[in-house]
Image: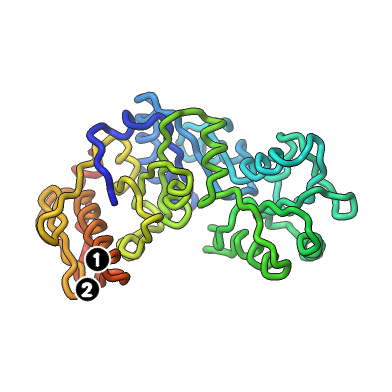
Amino acid sequence: MLRESTKPLTEAYDLAMLDLDGVVYIGQHAVPSAAPAIDLARAAGMHVAFITNNASRTPVQVSDHLRRLGVDAEPGDVVTSAQAAARVLRETLPDGAGVLLLGGRGLEEAIGEQGLRAVGPEEGPQAVVTGYGPDVLWRDLMRAAVLIRDGLWWVASNTDLTIPTAYGLGPGHGVQVRMLSEFSGVTPVVAGKPNRPLLDETMRRVGGERPLMVGDRLDTDIEGAYNAGTDSLLVLTGVTGLAELAAARPEERPTYLATDLNGLKETHPEVGLDGDRRVLGGWRAWVADGELTVDGHGETEDWWRAAAAACWDHLDATGSPAALSTAQPPVRSSDESGR
């Protein structure tokens, strides 16, 4: 359930771990509120980390991309699932161990940083590590699949089933993981969200004792925070809408909710309960005969918070998501967009 914060989140937490696509940018364009909100968070004393499940790009490539979009970022602010996977490998393997690598430049650089070597399948690798790489060949996948089936330890950067491309959503590394796993009968150790190694690596590299995960996806960002025992802020600039919120499992429910990264500088009020209705800031939300209704007036954020709470009450009581045909989120006003 959503929680109250009587302090702005920039004061309650000292590390903001920001997902990228859907939070800081959407495709090739920055989210308009992102750069000013990030600057404000830093000015308030927060560490800011940019974290990504995409293992193909290096931190330098990611930070260069962010700066082109007007977001202040250095390579040391970026933490990738490739770095998390390399750490998982290094915690078990000796220095200089050979690793069979299926992935891109980001993964190769990350294992080298940990003192490991990329080797071929005939050179006696001690593990295989896989990540998204557009140039991975089918013959290399077949060799790796046989070695995994025969017992070679396997670490995967992430299991995202889709990845944004210039021509639309394409199959992500998770599709490859699923294929290798079905063939070999082996489940890999996964470093990226929603598993916790990426968040642990972020805290290790960037610092901070009171971390807050900020994301737009329930099944990676928010569930990842849950698995790491970390509070989370869901922003609505990406893929999550009312339908996804209404169906969210307990481990996918954020600690806080805001329409965008301006939610970092705000306090977050408690969603009240009046009989069977959730109430907040002039809004009343409830589910009757399976249908969500929200009435009243007030700020857009409070509409979403009250609606989410009412939907979760219904889902927990019945096991079925509420119908949403009559519930229309209010259009955000110009006053709110500059709040």
Q: Residue furthest bottom?
A: 289
Residue 285 placement: quadrant: bottom left
Q: Secondary structure at mark 1?
A: helix
Question: Is 221 positioned to the left or the right of 318 in the image?
Answer: right
Considering only vertical position in the picture, is 112 above or below 154?
above
Say whether residue 285 is visible: yes
Discs 1, 2 touching: Cβ within 8 Å: yes
Which label was assigned to residue 235?
none
Separation of marks 1 and 2 at Cα, in angstroms:
8 Å
Question: Is 292 positioned to the left or the right of 165 in the image?
Answer: left
Considering only vertical position in the picture, is 129 above or below 168?
above
Q: Residues within 10 Å of mark 1 (few under 14, many from 20)?
A: many
Q: Who's the residue at 54% across and 41% down the image?
A: 65
Question: Is 14 positioned to the left or the right of 155 in the image?
Answer: left
Considering only vertical position in the picture, is 182 above or below 83?
below
Q: Who's the residue at 36% across and 34% down the image?
A: 36
Give how far across and how far down residue 96 sits, in percent.
Answer: 81, 36
Give how far across and how far down residue 133 sits, in percent.
Answer: 68, 54
Q: Circle 1 sits on which residue?
A: 314
Between 236 and 126, which is closer to the camera in this rendering? 126
**Residue type at tag 2:** Gly
Give how far across and how far down residue 192 sits, in percent.
Answer: 57, 49
**Residue type at tag 1:** His
Q: Who's the residue at 26% across and 57% down the image?
A: 308
Q: Circle 2 sits on which residue?
A: 290
